Amino acid sequence: MYEKDGEKYFVVDGHTHFWDASPANWIPGQEQYAKGWIECFHAYQGLGPPETHWSLEEFQKYSEERMMKDVFEDGHVDVAIFQPTNLRQWYKNGFNTTEVDGALAEKHPGRFVVNTTWDPRDGDRGLDVLEENVERWGCKGVKLYTAEWKGDSRGWSLKSDESARYLAKCQALGVTNIHVHKGPTIWPLDKDAFDVSDIDFAATNFPELNFVVEHVGLPRIEDFCFMATQEPNVYAGLAVVVGGLMHARPRFFAKVMGELMFWLGEDKLVFGADYAIWEPRWQVEGFVDWQMPDSEEFADYSPLSVTAKKKILGLNAARLYDIEIPAELRPEAVPTETPVGVPGQ
């Protein structure tokens, strides 16, 4: 919980990781990709305040103790949602797996929500693994990487018949939150495999599932906004938006936030710190203090209210995941401005 100026914020970090990208985990013959991937992540960390930068060695593999301190003790986070990324083509034990995340979550009850992942190219066996993971870890969400390499394949689409089988399986298992990485690429993956063109197709076909587009499709913010406003079950995941832009690109950050609020509204934005690329503390504190610039350039956009910030920092994610909110932090029944798009909530 974070408190500022007498206001209390229940913070849910909707996008966090516990990874091992150390050289010991690199697959022989794939070292250049494993090394390039984590170095690209590390470069993104440079977009945060200088005092939050880590050495590359620290960044490749960090301890449980450091994560718990950064996220919960110092970072103001009440509950964090793990978003796994396997990358087994480059990393022996996977980069950030459901199993590793789940083991940490079991050691710290109530602190983490464990999501799993799937890849439609895994066929029938992948469906069985999905069901096993959901039963084992109680998953209510998945994280998908449509640009992940597998053999000669360099990506897949949510429009495919194979993907539809997995989405139907999620619906049958009660896995209602489908997080999809759509946005800035990470070398050596292909940028075009991360575009948002397959989201609305899947969202329309599966109206009972929530599609949280992580990183809001950046740099295709306009594509995302126009797509998301027509689909009542598409949400904006703010990982990278806050961590990558608020400090390094404040004018672009204001534009992106203005567009998201105009088209989607405060009920469909979900905060994510994207640890360990960026630590949550400066993001939470900075977002609570942030306000739309008072200048002609941003006159099209409305100020961000305290009520909106509370929803974005935690209450929206708590609603999607049915996370219990302490009584003193529960939202007030305050009417909100209707966004331009189809509310459908």
Image (cartoon, rainbow, N blue to C red):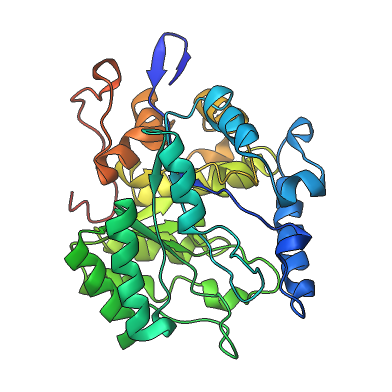
Residue at point 27% right, 58% down?
Answer: 135
Residue at point 33% right, 44% down?
Answer: 265
Please indicate whether residue 8 sits to the left or right of residue 56 in the image. left
Does the rendering let one see residue 159? no
Q: Position of residue 50 (x, y in %)?
A: 79, 34
Please indicate whether residue 279 sits to the left or right of residue 108 in the image. right
Please indicate whether residue 311 sits to the left or right of residue 186 in the image. left
Q: Nearer the viewer, residue 175 or 291?
A: 175
On screen, residue 170 above or below 82: below
Q: Position of residue 295 (x, y in %)?
A: 58, 33
Does the rendering let one see residue 326? yes
Q: Nearer the viewer, residue 127 or 342?
A: 127
Q: Position of residue 163 (x, y in %)?
A: 34, 80
Q: Nearer the viewer, residue 306 or 126?
A: 126
Query: Residue placed farthest to the top in the image?
Result: 6
Q: Position of residue 272 (x, y in %)?
A: 49, 43
Quadrant of the drawing holding the N terminus: top left
Q: How many marks?
A: 0
Residue at point 33% right, 47% down?
Answer: 268
Please indicate whether residue 40 sits to the left or right of residue 180 in the image. right
Residue at point 41% right, 30% down?
Answer: 309
On screen, residue 33 above or below 213: below
Q: Nearer the viewer, residue 340 or 122?
A: 122
